C-alpha cells in the first residue's frame, strides 16, 4: 500500500521576529516568508538596469538573477538562521529555478507554434488539400483526413488486441506464456518508432515489392507502437479493481468470463479509456514510421489500401524541409499543420485527464 | 552533567543534554479550522517518564507531536497557547523548528532505521548533521556510548558496518533510540514505541526507558494501559466526548494515583476498562 | 494516473484495496453427490471462448514481435551478405553503420547528461517543495512535455533554440575551445550536435522525471519523519532518506530515457546539419548523423541495396535500444527484490 507523499513543510509564521528566543534562534530573527522573493525581485531589477546599459539579454538576466539571488539568500539566511539553514534555503531556490528552467522549453515551444501557425488558421487551410497548389494557398484537409484514417485503423487494431492481452496477463495468465508475454510487451515499449516503420515496410515489401506505399502500412506501424501502451495501462487498471469485487461475483455463481466482461472491465473502463486516449495522443504525432510507409501525397485519399496517403506529421515535415521557391508559403503551411497537430494532441491529453478525474477509481490517495 | 556530556561528545554537541522541563499552557492545536486538541495545560517533569493514555483518536499523538513541532509537517496546522522548554518558547516567531528538534527528540511507532546506512551510520546520523567536523575517534566514542545507552552495544559491536535493517524488530527500535539519544536531546518523545514489537522486545524497551529517564525527560504515548502503569511515573489521560470533538486532557497525576484512585470518574472508567 | 506510458510499474501491487464485505461461501450443495462449485467457475463454453480470445491476443503480440525481428532480418540480409563495394560509401556495412552508431550514442548521451539532473530536480520540486494544491498541475505540465510530437520539437529546435544558442556556443568556443567538444568553428545556424542533444534532453526529461517523482513520493513517511525529528533541514532529509531510497529507480528511469533518446528520429533529422564524419565537436556544422535520422533522410529516395542497408542499420538500432531497455528492467527487478 503506497504511503502518502510526504507533504511539503508548512510555511513558517509570517511575522518577523520580535526578539530572539535563546538557543532556538541563532541570534537574529528568522527570514520572513517574503524575504527570498524580495531578494529575487530586487536582484532582477538591478541586473536589468545594469544590462540595459551594456546590452540587454534576457537569458543573461535570468541566469544572473538566479545565481546572484541564491548567493544573497544563502548569506542572509546563514547570518540569520545558521549555516545549515542557509544552505537549505539556497538549495530550495536552486531546485525551484531548475524547475522553472524545465518549463521554459514548454512555454517557448507552445508560444512559437501558436504564433507561427496562427497565420494559416484560415478557412482555406482546413478545406483544401495541396492538389494543384504550387506556391501560396493550399491546406491540410488531405493530411488531416489521412491522419484520422491511419490512426483510426491503428486504434481499431491495437485496442482490442491490447485490452484482451492485458486481460490475459492479469486474469488468466500463468506459467511460461505469461512470463514471456510480460517480458516482450516491455520490449515492445522500447521499439524505436522508425524501426516499427521499417517492419511495416519490410512486411509489405516482401509481398508487394519495395516501392509500395500505402496508408494501411502506416497503420500497421502505429499499431505496433500502440499495443504495448494499451496493454500496460489496461493491466494497471485491472490491478486497481479490487479482488473482492471478483470474489463477490464468483460467490454469486457468475462465471469467470462474465465476471471479467461485465464486472471487471466496466469498472476499469474509465482508466482503460484514458490509457487508449493517451496511446492515440502518443502515436498521432509520429512522423518517422509514416515517412517511410505512407509517403506523401497532395490530394485527399480516402482509401488506405490504395497508394500514398498524406498525414499531418509527414506534411509538416515535407513542407518545412523541402520548401519551394519562395519558401515562405511552405514554411507557413508547416507551422499551421504543426499547430493543428499540437491542438489535437493537447485536446486528447486534456480529455484523457478529465475522463480519468471524473470517472476513474482513485488509484492512490 | 552538561560538562561531562559535552566533553565526552568532544565538545561539539551543543551544550545541552540536561533533562529539561516542558511547560504547556492553554495549548490548542488546529488542523485548518478543525480543533483537534483543546486547552491543554500541563507540566512535563524533568527526569521523569510521563505517559499519555487514552483511546485512539483522542489527540494524544497530535499533542505529543506538537511538543517538537512535528505536527507542522502537515500543512494547515497551527497552535495557540505556549509550549516552553525550561522557559524558552518553542513557538516563538524567531524559533527555528530545526533547532527545536535537535533538543527534543522523537522515536516513532514503527522502527525505522535508515535502510541504506550501516548501524554505525544510523547512530551517527544526527551527529553528522550537527557537527561535521567531529574526529573519527570522538564519533566512535559517541556512537558506542549511545549504543550502550540503548542496551544494544553488545549485540552489534561486531557488525557496526552492517545495514541497520538487518536487525530484529526490537533491536531496530533500540537502534532508533540510540540514534535519537546520540545527539543528547533534553527531552525524548516516544510515540507508541512498542506497539510494533513482541512482548519480550517490549519488556526490553521498558527496562531501557527506566534507565534512560536518569538522563532524559521522557514523554511516551501508549495505548497499552498496562505499559503506562509499569513504565511511567506520571500519567496523563486524554479523551474526547465523541468523534469530531477536540481531545482534552482529563487528568494528570502520578501513575500510582491514576491507576488506583483517580480523582475523576471518567478516568476511573477508562482505566478500569469500562470504555475505550 | 495520467502520465506517458512507460513500461515500468515500480509499484508492484501497491494500490489501495478497498475492503469489500466478506464474500459469502458458495451455498452448500443440497444433494450430497453434487460437486461444490469452485471459486472461479471457468468451464462453460463462454469461458473457453473468452479465455481463448485473451490468450490469442497474447499470442498475437508475441507473433507480431517475432514478425518484426524476422522481417527485418530478411530485408537486412542482402546488405549483410553484400560485397563491401556495393554498400553506399564503398567500404562495407560496418563502416557505413559505425559513424551513425557513434552519432546516435553521442546525441543520446548529451541528452541524458542534461536531462537526468534536471529531471531529478523537477521531480523533487513536485514531490517535496511545491505546495500540495499545485503539485498535481505541475505534474501535468511536466507530462505535457512528453506529449508533444517529436517533429514539433524538431521545428522548435531549428527555428528557435538553435539560433538562441549561437551566442552560448560562441562563448564556449572562445573560453573552452581547448576541449575537443567545443573546438569550433562555430555554426552560425545552430544546427549542431549540442542543440540536438539539448532538444533530446528536453524530450526525455518528462520520462525520467515521472519515474523519479513516483518513487520520491513513495518514500516511507516514517523514514522522513525520523530524519526531521533528528533536527535535519528539508534538504538534509532529502539527501539522507529520499535520494538513497529513489536511487535505483532514478537509474532505471534514466536508462529508459536513454533508450528513448537513442531511437528518436525526427527532432535530430530536422535539426542536425550532417556531413558524415565521426567527431566529438559539438558546436560545428559538420556532424555525424544518427541511425534513425539517416534512415529518415535517405529512405524516401533510396532503392535496391541501399534500402537493405538502411534496414540493416535499423536492426542495429533495435538491438542497441533492446539492450538498454532490458538493462533498465533488470535494475528495476533488482530494486523490487531488495527494496
Image: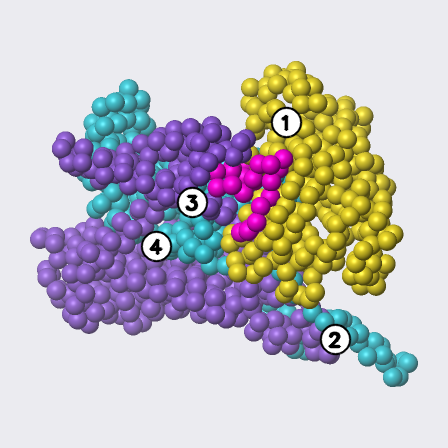
Could you confirm whether marks 1 and 4 are on the same chain? no
Could you tell me which quadrant the C terminus of chain C lies in?
top right
Q: Which residues are magenta?
A: B78-98
- The residue wearing badge 3 is A15
Q: What numbered label is drawn on residue A251?
A: 2
Left or right of residue B225: residue B8: left
Mark 3 against mark 4, which lies toward the viewer? 3
- Pointer 3 with pointer 4, Cβ within 8 A: no
Left or right of residue B30: residue A254: right
Callout 4: residue from which chain? C
* Residue sitting at x 65%, y 74%: A259
Q: Which chain is cyan?
A: C
Could you confirm whether marks 3 and 2 are on the same chain? yes
How far apart marks 3 and 1 lie (CA) works out to: 29 Å
Instruction: Indicate the colour of chain B.
Output: yellow
Label 4, secondary structure: give it: loop
- The residue wearing badge 1 is B16
Q: Is residue C111 visible?
A: no
- Pointer 3 with pointer 2, Cβ within 8 A: no
* Residue sitting at x 15%, y 61%: A119
- Pointer 2 with pointer 1, Cβ within 8 A: no
How far apart marks 1 and 4 lie (CA) works out to: 57 Å
Q: Earlier in the sequence, mark 3 or mark 2?
A: 3
Callout 2: residue from which chain? A
* Residue sitting at x 49%, y 48%: A10
Amino acid at each position: 500500500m503506497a504511503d502518502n507523499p510526504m507533504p511539503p513543510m508548512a510555511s513558517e509564521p509570517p511575522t518577523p521576529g520580535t526578539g530572539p528566543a535563546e538557543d532556538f534562534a541563532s541570534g537574529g530573527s528568522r527570514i520572513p516568508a517574503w524575504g527570498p522573493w524580495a531578494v529575487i525581485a530586487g536582484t532582477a531589477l538591478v541586473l536589468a538596469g545594469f544590462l540595459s546599459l551594456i546590452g540587454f539579454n534576457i537569458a543573461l538576466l535570468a541566469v544572473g538573477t538566479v545565481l546572484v539571488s541564491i548567493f544573497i539568500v544563502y548569506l542572509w539566511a546563514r547570518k540569520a538562521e545558521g549555516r545549515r539553514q542557509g544552505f537549505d534555503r539556497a538549495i530550495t531556490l536552486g531546485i525551484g529555478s531548475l524547475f522553472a528552467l524545465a518549463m521554459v522549453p514548454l512555454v517557448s515551444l507552445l508560444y512559437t507554434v501558436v504564433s507561427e501557425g496562427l497565420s494559416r488558421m484560415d478557412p482555406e487551410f482546413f478545406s483544401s488539400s495541396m492538389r494543384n497548389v504550387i506556391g501560396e494557398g493550399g491546406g491540410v484537409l488531405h493530411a488531416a483526413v489521412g491522419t484520422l484514417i491511419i490512426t483510426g485503423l491503428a486504434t481499431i487494431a491495437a485496442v482490442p488486441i491490447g485490452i484482451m492481452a492485458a486481460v490475459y496477463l492479469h486474469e488468466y495468465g500463468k506459467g511460461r506464456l505469461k512470463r514471456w508475454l510480460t517480458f516482450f510487451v516491455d520490449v515492445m515499449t522500447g521499439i524505436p518508432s522508425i524501426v516499427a516503420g521499417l517492419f511495416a515496410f519490410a512486411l509489405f515489401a516482401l509481398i508487394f515489392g519495395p516501392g509500395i506505399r500505402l496508408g494501411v502500412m502506416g497503420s500497421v506501424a502505429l499499431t505496433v507502437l500502440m499495443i504495448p501502451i494499451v496493454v500496460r495501462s489496461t493491466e494497471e487498471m485491472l490491478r486497481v479493481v479490487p479482488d473482492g469485487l471478483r470474489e463477490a461475483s464468483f460467490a454469486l455463481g457468475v462465471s469467470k468470463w462474465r465476471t471479467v466482461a461485465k464486472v471487471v472491465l466496466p469498472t476499469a473502463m474509465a482508466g482503460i479509456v484514458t490509457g487508449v486516449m493517451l496511446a492515440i495522443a502518443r502515436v498521432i504525432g509520429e512522423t518517422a514510421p509514416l515517412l517511410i510507409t505512407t509517403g506523401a501525397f497532395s490530394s485527399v485519399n480516402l482509401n488506405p489500401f490504395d497508394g500514398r496517403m498524406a498525414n499531418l506529421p509527414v506534411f509538416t515535415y515535407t513542407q518545412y524541409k523541402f520548401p519551394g521557391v519562395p519558401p515562405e508559403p511552405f514554411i507557413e503551411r508547416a507551422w499551421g499543420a504543426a499547430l493543428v497537430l499540437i491542438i489535437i494532441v493537447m485536446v486528447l491529453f486534456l480529455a484523457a485527464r478529465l475522463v480519468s478525474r471524473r470517472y476513474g477509481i482513485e488509484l492512490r490517495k | 552533567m552538561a560538562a561531562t556530556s559535552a566533553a565526552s561528545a568532544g565538545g561539539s554537541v551543543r551544550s545541552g543534554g540536561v533533562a529539561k522541563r516542558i511547560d504547556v499552557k492553554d495549548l490548542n492545536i488546529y488542523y485548518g479550522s478543525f480543533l483537534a486538541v483543546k486547552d491543554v495545560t500541563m507540566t512535563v517533569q524533568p527526569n521523569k517518564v510521563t505517559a499519555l493514555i487514552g483511546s485512539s483518536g483522542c489527540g494524544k499523538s497530535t499533542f505529543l507531536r506538537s511538543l517538537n513541532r512535528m505536527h507542522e509537517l502537515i500543512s494547515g496546522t497551527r497552535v495557540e497557547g505556549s509550549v516552553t522548554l525550561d522557559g524558552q518558547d518553542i513557538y516563538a516567531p524567531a524559533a527555528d523548528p530545526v533547532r527545536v528538534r535537535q533538543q527534543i527528540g522523537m522515536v516513532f511507532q514503527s522502527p525505522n532505521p535508515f535502510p541504506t546506512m550501516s548501524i554505525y551510520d544510523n547512530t551517527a546520523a544526527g551527529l553528522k548533521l550537527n557537527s561535521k567536523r567531529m574526529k573519527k575517534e570522538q564519533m566512535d566514542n559517541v556512537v558506542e556510548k549511545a549504543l550502550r545507552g540503548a542496551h544494544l552495544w553488545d549485540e552489534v559491536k561486531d557488525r557496526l558496518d552492517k545495514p541497520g535493517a538487518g536487525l530484529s524488530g526490537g533491536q531496530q527500535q533500540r537502534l532508533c533510540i540510540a540514534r535519537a539519544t546520540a545527539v543528547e536531546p533534553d527531552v525524548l518523545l516516544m510515540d507508541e514505541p512498542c506497539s510494533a514489537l513482541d512482548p519480550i522486545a517490549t519488556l526490553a524497551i521498558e527496562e531501557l526507558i527506566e534507565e534512560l529517564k536518569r538522563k532524559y525527560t521522557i514523554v511516551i504515548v501508549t495505548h497499552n494501559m498496562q505499559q503506562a502503569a509499569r513504565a511511567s511515573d506520571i500519567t496523563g489521560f486524554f479523551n474526547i466526548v465523541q468523534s469530531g470533538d477536540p481531545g482534552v486532557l482529563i487528568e494528570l497525576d502520578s501513575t500510582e494515583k491514576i491507576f488506583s484512585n483517580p480523582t475523576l470518574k471518567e478516568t476511573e472508567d477508562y482505566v478500569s476498562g469500562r470504555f475505550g | 494516473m495520467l502520465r506517458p506510458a512507460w513500461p515500468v510499474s515500480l509499484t508492484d501491487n501497491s494500490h489501495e484495496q478497498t475492503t469489500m464485505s466478506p464474500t459469502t461461501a458458495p451455498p452448500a450443495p443440497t444433494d450430497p453427490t453434487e460437486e461444490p462449485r469452485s471459486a472461479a467457475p471457468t468451464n462453460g463454453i463462454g469461458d473457453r471462448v473468452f479465455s481463448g480470445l485473451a490468450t490469442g491476443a497474447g499470442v498475437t503480440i508475441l507473433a507480431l514481435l517475432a514478425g518484426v525481428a524476422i522481417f527485418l532480418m530478411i530485408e537486412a540480409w542482402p546488405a549483410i551478405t553484400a560485397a563491401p563495394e556495393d554498400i553506399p560509401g564503398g567500404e562495407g556495412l560496418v563502416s557505413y553503420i559505425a559513424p551513425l552508431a557513434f552519432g546516435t550514442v553521442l546525441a543520446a548521451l548529451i541528452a541524458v547528461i542534461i536531462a537526468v539532473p534536471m529531471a531529478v530536480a523537477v521531480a523533487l520540486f513536485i514531490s517535496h517543495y511545491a505546495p500540495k494544491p499545485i503539485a498535481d498541475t505541475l505534474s501535468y505540465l511536466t507530462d505535457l512535455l512528453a506529449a508533444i510530437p517529436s517533429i514539433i520539437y524538431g521545428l522548435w529546435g531549428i527555428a528557435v533554440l538553435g539560433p538562441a544558442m549561437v551566442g552560448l556556443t560562441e562563448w564556449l568556443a572562445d573560453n573552452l575551445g581547448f576541449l575537443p567538444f567545443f573546438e569550433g568553428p562555430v555554426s552560425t545556424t545552430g544546427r549542431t550536435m549540442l542543440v540536438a542533444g539539448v532538444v533530446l534532453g528536453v524530450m526525455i526529461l518528462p520520462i525520467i522525471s515521472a519515474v523519479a517523482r513516483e518513487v520520491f513520493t513513495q518514500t516511507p513517511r516514517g523514514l522522513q519523519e525520523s530524519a526531521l525529528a533528528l533536527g535535519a533541514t528539508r534538504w538534509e532529509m532529502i539527501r539522507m532518506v529520499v535520494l538513497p531510497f529513489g536511487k535505483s529507480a532514478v537509474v532505471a528511469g534514466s536508462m529508459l530515457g536513454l533508450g528513448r533518446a537513442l531511437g528518436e528520429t525526427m527532432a535530430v533529422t530536422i535539426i542536425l546539419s550532417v556531413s558524415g564524419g565521426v567527431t566529438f565537436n559539438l558546436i560545428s556544422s559538420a556532424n555525424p548523423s544518427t541511425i534513425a535520422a539517416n534512415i529518415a533522410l535517405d529512405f524516401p529516395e533510396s532503392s535496391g541495396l541501399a534500402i537493405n542497408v538502411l534496414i540493416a542499420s535499423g536492426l542495429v538500432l533495435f538491438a542497441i535500444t533492446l539492450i538498454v531497455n532490458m538493462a533498465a528492467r533488470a535494475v528495476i527487478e533488482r530494486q523490487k527484490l531488495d527494496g
